[in-house]
Image (cartoon, rainbow, N blue to C red):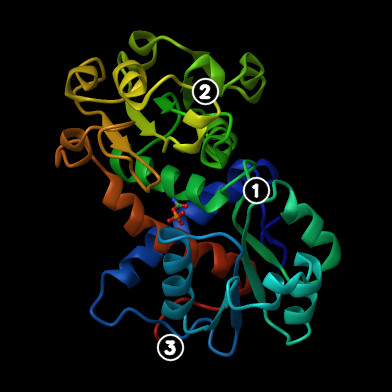
């Protein structure tokens, strides 16, 4: 499924694909923790980062991932490209494809653009997030972070809280974690989710006590502040009080609960600073570290299978 084709959504991957990518990611993390953080595995390959939307974590970590595997990396910048003169996304991608890259990493505001691009391109694609649809490598790094800590996914109570309706992270998390047997709860204001999200396999709740009680893992999502203008919640203060995670609410969860967030965090809104910086429970920066490893693994399984990831 992955080799030679890429990763455009966890919806399309099987349990074994996901487990294989995570297994390789742990080996890749060993490389990243060495003093010399590079193996020659993808020497001579070219990775193109096509980011039509802004990014800190995903773009930087894909670039580091490719470089640690010795691939050449080209970063397309929307602002200085001819896309800003009106060239279509497909024309832009086809023109860069004519330069013979080996894989495209694509972030775009349009949901479903990956399926469209995959019909027009021969080059494999790895999604770095499309609209409100999916962010598959974020889902994979979330799974890796949980596996790292809890040694399993099956049977864990995982709460994903916030603006579920507009979250590509929530969708990739439920596709991935659902396949691995987690009990996923979506906790959200009713204006930011619809009950039919249960058809994805999650339990939908608007009740903080039901959501957080005995949680093994809590994933807080960023509230997009423009949603307040759209009337989806009355005020940031009200949102923090009713739906945010603070020290008091954290006590409802299991004593060894881990707290995650894809970033960027709105401190004091969806997550209090005391929880975000809580060394015992917060795994937010571990997620960022694992993001490089998962992206090394994703690139490797897409264009490098058959090559060893050793120093030889
Ligand atoms: N988690 C995430 O996608 O962050 P960036 O938008 O900074 O890439």
Q: Position of residue 259 (x, y in %)?
A: 29, 35
Q: Nearer the viewer, residue 211 or 183?
A: 211
Q: Nearer the viewer, mark 2 or mark 1?
A: 2
Secondary structure under tag 1 reads loop
Instruction: State how far apart marks 2 and 1 are (Cα).
Output: 27 Å
Q: Which mark is residue 33?
A: none
Q: Which residue is mark 1?
A: 9
Secondary structure under tag 3 reads loop
Q: Which residue is at 74% across, 48% downward?
A: 112
Q: Position of residue 143 (x, y in %)?
A: 44, 43
Earlier residue among tags 2 and 3 = 2
| Mark 3 Cα shell of 10 Å, populated few (<14), some (14-19), many (≥20) | few
Q: Nearer the viewer, mark 2 or mark 3?
A: 2
Secondary structure under tag 2 reads loop
Q: Which mark is residue 232?
A: 2
Q: Position of residue 116 (x, y in %)?
A: 81, 56
Q: Nearer the viewer, residue 187 or 304?
A: 187
Instruction: State how far apart marks 2 and 3 are (Cα).
Output: 55 Å
Q: Quadrant of the C terminus?
A: bottom left
Q: Which residue is mark 3?
A: 312
Q: Which quadrant contains ligand 1?
A: bottom left
On screen, residue 106 versus residue 272, left or right, reads right
């Amino acid at each position: 499924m992955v080799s030679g084709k890429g990763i455009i959504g966890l919806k399309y991957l099987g349990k074994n694909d996901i487990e294989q990518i995570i297994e390789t990611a742990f080996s890749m993390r060993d490389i990243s923790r060495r003093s010399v953080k590079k193996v020659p595995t993808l020497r001579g390959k070219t990775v193109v980062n096509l980011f039509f939307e802004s990014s800190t974590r995903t773009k930087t970590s894909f670039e580091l991932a490719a470089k640690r595997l010795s691939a050449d990396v080209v970063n397309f910048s929307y602002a200085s490209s001819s896309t800003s003169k009106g060239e279509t996304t497909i024309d832009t991608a086809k023109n860069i494809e004519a330069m013979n890259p080996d894989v495209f990493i694509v972030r775009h505001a349009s949901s479903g653009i990956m399926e469209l691009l995959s019909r027009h391109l021969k080059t494999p694609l790895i999604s770095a997030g499309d609209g409100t649809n999916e962010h598959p490598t974020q889902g994979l790094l979330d799974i890796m972070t949980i596996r790292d800590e809890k040694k399993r996914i099956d049977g864990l109570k995982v709460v994903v809280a916030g603006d579920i309706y507009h979250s590509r992270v929530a969708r990739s998390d439920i596709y991935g974690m659902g396949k691995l047997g987690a009990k996923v709860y979506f906790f959200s204001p009713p204006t930011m989710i619809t009950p039919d999200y249960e058809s994805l396999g999650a339990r939908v709740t608007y009740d903080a006590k039901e959501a957080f009680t005995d949680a093994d893992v809590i994933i807080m999502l960023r509230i997009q502040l423009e949603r307040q203008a759209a009337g989806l919640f009355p005020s940031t203060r009200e949102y923090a009080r009713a739906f945010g995670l603070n020290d008091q609410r954290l006590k409802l969860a299991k004593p060894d609960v881990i707290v995650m967030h894809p970033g960027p965090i709105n401190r004091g809104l969806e997550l209090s600073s005391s929880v975000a910086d809580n060394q015992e429970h917060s795994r937010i920066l571990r997620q960022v570290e694992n993001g490089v490893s998962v992206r090394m693994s994703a690139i490797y399984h897409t264009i490098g299978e058959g090559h060893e990831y050793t120093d030889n």
